Image (tube, rainbow, N blue to C red):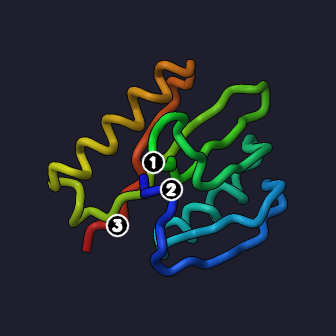
Amino acid sequence: MRKKDYRGRCTKAASPKSETVCRLYDDLMIAYLRNLEAEKDIVSIQTNVQLEGMDFTSDFLCQREGGDYMVRECVYRKYLTKPLTARLLDTSRTYWLKHGIYDWGVIVDAEK
């Protein structure tokens, strides 16, 4: 999750599964987008989806074959124990549960 008006580093990438240019804010998001593109059951990818009524966005909202949706948030391992990170992740999970999306998860970088 990020602030909707995030001003940090941004990499723009085209994806055959996205209708718009994907804005990716770190290497973890870039790597996960490539993984999503390789998954055959993912038919649509949206990045930085704004949560209605909030100033935050979710990293990935993807549609699977059959119409089911999944949400993924990308977080570096070193930030997982930070209280703000935990609060933002819980806010995202709760928001999507209220909107009927139960396949919610966190993508974490590899352990060194």
Q: Position of residue 29 (x, y in %)?
A: 52, 65
Picture quarter with the C terminus: bottom left
Q: Position of residue 69 (x, y in %)?
A: 65, 31
Q: Give the CA distance from mark 3 to mark 1.
A: 29 Å
Q: Is residue 54 above or below residue 101?
A: below
Q: Which residue is mark 3?
A: 110
Q: Are marks 3 and 1 in contact (CB under 8 Å)?
A: no
Q: Which residue is mark 2?
A: 4
What crowding class fits label 1: few (fewer than 14 Cα within 10 Å), some (14-19), or many (20 or more)?
few
For the image, the number of numbered tags is 3
Depth-wise, is mark 2 or mark 3 nearer the camera? 2
Q: Earlier in the sequence, mark 1 or mark 2?
A: 2
Q: Is residue 81 left or right of residue 106?
A: left
Callout 2 amino acid: Lys
| Callout 3: SS | loop
Q: Are marks 2 and 3 in contact (CB under 8 Å)?
A: no
Q: Which mark is residue 55?
A: 1
Callout 3 amino acid: Ala
Q: Earlier in the sequence, mark 3 or mark 1?
A: 1
Q: Give the CA distance from mark 1 to mark 2.
A: 5 Å
